[in-house]
Image (spheres, rainbow, N blue to C red):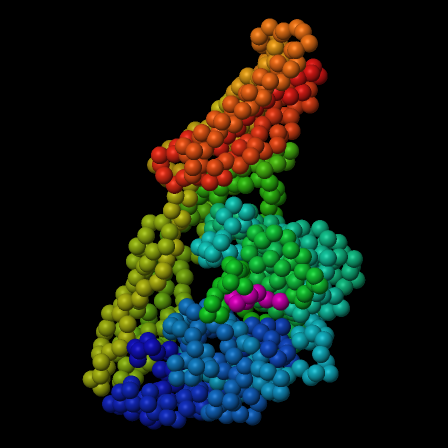
Amino acid sequence: MGAHLQPLALRLLALTFPLVAKGFPDETLEKAAKSEGYCSRILRAQGTRREGYNEFSLRVEGDPEFYKPGNSYRVTLSAATPAYFRGFTLIALKEGKEGDKEEDHAGTFQIIDEEETQFMSNCPVAVTESTPRRRTRIQVFWTAPPTGTGCVILKASIVQKRIIYFQDEGSLTKKICEQDSASEGVTDKPILDCCACGTAKYRLTFYGNWSEKTHPKDFPRRTNHWSAIIGSSHSKNYILWEYGGYASEGVKQVAELGSPVKMEEEIRQQSDEVLTVIKAKAQWPAWQPLNVRAAPSAEFSVDRHRHLMSFLTMLGPSPDWNVGLSAEDLCTKDCGWVQKVVQDLIPWDAGTDSGVTYESPNKPTVPQEKIRPLTSLDHPQSPFYDPEGGSIKLVARVVIERIARKGEQCNIVPDNIDDIVADLAPEEKEEDDTPETCIYSNWSPWSACSSSTCEKGKRMRQRMLKAQLDLSVPCPDTQDFQPCMGPGCSDEDGSTCMMSDWITWSPCSVSCGMGTRSRERYVKQFPEDGSMCKVPTEETEKCIVNEECSPSSCLVTEWGEWDECSASCGTGMKRRHRMIKMTPADGSMCKAETTEAEKCMMPECHTIPCLLSSWSEWSDCSVTCGKGMRTRQRMLKSAAELGDCNEELEQAEKCMLPECPIDCELTEWSQWSECNTSCGKGHMIRTRMIKIEPQFGGTACPETVQRTKCRVRKCLRGPGMEKRRWKEAREKRRSEQAKKNLESEQYPVCRLKPWTAWTECSTLCGGGIQERYMLVKKRSKSTQFTSCKDKKELRACNVHPC
């Protein structure tokens, strides 16, 4: 990376070294860094630093005390609200090592999100930020080193403005030791006993991020979905699933079929170890914008005995791929309850089916294999395959947030503001009784209130029923009403005052440091009963202008109000400005920013749903028999100015009527056979074959054999008759032989094989035919002898009636 794109952590750490004196170019820094071993310089940096700052924490998924060589673990670096960080570094060292040699580092990191994290250019074993900006958490994978490495120290540093936070012990350092071979088979997520009191209530929200846009390879457009979520809050004596374990029958049915029935049955059989069964609806399709379909969620409780939670959901269609959490501990070491857990999820293989693509045919894995995370090198046909072994793109995120606590709590650490607010005003879950078989469009925006005064009125929103998969299950209404009052009125505090909007904030009371500012509003309409308005008309807050009040700092005005968003709908940008009041007294340049920009979100473009008529009846089938097509239509009822309508107005489907009749088909008639007598009256026959039998009421087959009379010369009577016939037959044979000899002399290069035997009769009775062939033995290459061809003879057979 160029000098201008160096990570913030690298640039700020460089400020702490005497090498970077005034006038030293970046090239000098780079050469010096390489010569002294930059990895060790990270650890020895002595800039402005603070120890023991607990707003930042480094966590290994599951908080294990031991690692299993070669296993991968998710590592999270996070800041507690309202703290944040702009840059960071993350390394893994063998215990007792300084980090100035390559062999001092243990294991390898794997990047999850390239927009957030990257490897350091001068220290490729360390991870740092991709771009300097405000952030509250990052995640990477760490693969444990081979056997014999011993204990490993994961260390992080946090960069916030010009302050660098290190921690050799505490929340920015994590020690994890190699699992002893004697404890092989024991879970590498040792779970401690919980010391918290009372119970806590949590909400799980699942955000799917698996779509054709994020995972385009072989994406199943028609059948993509997440199965129903199933899980529980449970004790450490019961494990639903875990990496390195074998899938139960319940896990197998979720993984392969998306069915939670058996899994729920297994959970309920562990009634003493389970507190809450966690269930949420399936999602068809797998991804839709949150303003179209709310993310599925479920609430559950935990207590001191059952303080773990696990869940899973199938990524469908797939052989046996899932996502989920296993034994997530919601009890803290400080005897309290975790406020919030955010985890990004990659798919894992249940080890029960050997398919490698989304829609592979069933191929049971025998013997069953252990549960493992999928990787980008599993199989070239895998939709997650990457020949370079890169990270698998995340397919989902789960957020677990505490919404209430009950009973006497005994945590020894004081609650922060977030904890107190969560308990004082727990969110009420909006029950969604919409059946899974009813598929709706997103809700339209709320209409204006029917009342413009402080009298109660109504407002309305609408949605469209797009599909009803099961006609036996009724779908709820498509209109929703809510009580409301005019602008400025509040029903919650009992006031009937109509207030104006707030007027712009006043300037800060000081030009340098911390002061105060205020804003006002006025009463637009007093209560009809003559009472006084209790709504506040003035508001005051603290403000900071020019934090650094030194001769080298410049004085600036407060930020102005934000400009209007650049977009009228969707995502846009907004800006605000301030002015320089006084340049630095020491004559240096003023580095303060005078313009600030950030993203702004406006209502989604064209969010008003189409209003459509019901579907018409299906048309008649396009054919009178066999396979055809039929159609149905509906009309657009909403006005065109409400937005573009992309809903289909016509549908077509296949239709099937009784099969069309098939008539009998015959071959052409054969040649007439020879007369069946040598003298007197006889008969000749000819035949034809059935090519297609009649079906479905088609025309029946006509006769296949025809006879006709024939007459040869009159038979002579007397004792010399037989002798005469024999003589005539002999003369005929001689004549035929002479003819053949003549042909042989004329065409010496055309030689024929003897006649073959007669074939079997084509029918057993009623008159059939037999065939025999004389094939060419030697054919002339000259084009003059075109008469040298194979010969064929036919004769009648089995002429007796059937």
| Residue found 43% across the figure and 69% down from its top | 114
Task: Please provide the residue range marked out in magenta.
Answer: 372-378
Q: Quadrant of the C terminus?
A: top right
Q: Is residue 779 left or right of residue 772?
A: left
Name the main secondary structure of what is drawn in magenta: loop
Q: Quadrant of residue 86?
A: bottom left
> Camera-side residue: 162 or 497?
162
Percent x, y of residue 409: 68, 69
| Residue found 74% across the figure and 61% down from its top | 274
Q: Quadrant of residue 337?
A: bottom right
Q: Quadrant of residue 267?
A: bottom right
| Residue found 55% across the figure and 56% down from its top | 357
Q: Is residue 432 left or right of residue 89?
A: right
Percent x, y of residue 39: 44, 87
Q: Is residue 536 left or right of residue 401?
A: left
Is residue 253 among what the camera can see? yes
Q: Eyeballing the image, is 255 above or below 145?
A: above
Q: Quadrant of the N terminus?
A: bottom left
> Camera-side residue: 159 or 470?
470
Q: Eyeballing the image, is 688 above or below 118?
A: above
> Camera-side residue: 693 or 418?
693
Is residue 135 among what the camera can see? no
Percent x, y of residue 530: 46, 45
Q: Is residue 636 left or right of residue 666?
A: left
Percent x, y of residue 555: 26, 76
> Camera-side residue: 6 or 110?
110
Answer whether residue 457 is magenta in the image. no
| Residue found 59% across the figure and 46% down from its top | 432
Count of numbered tags: 0
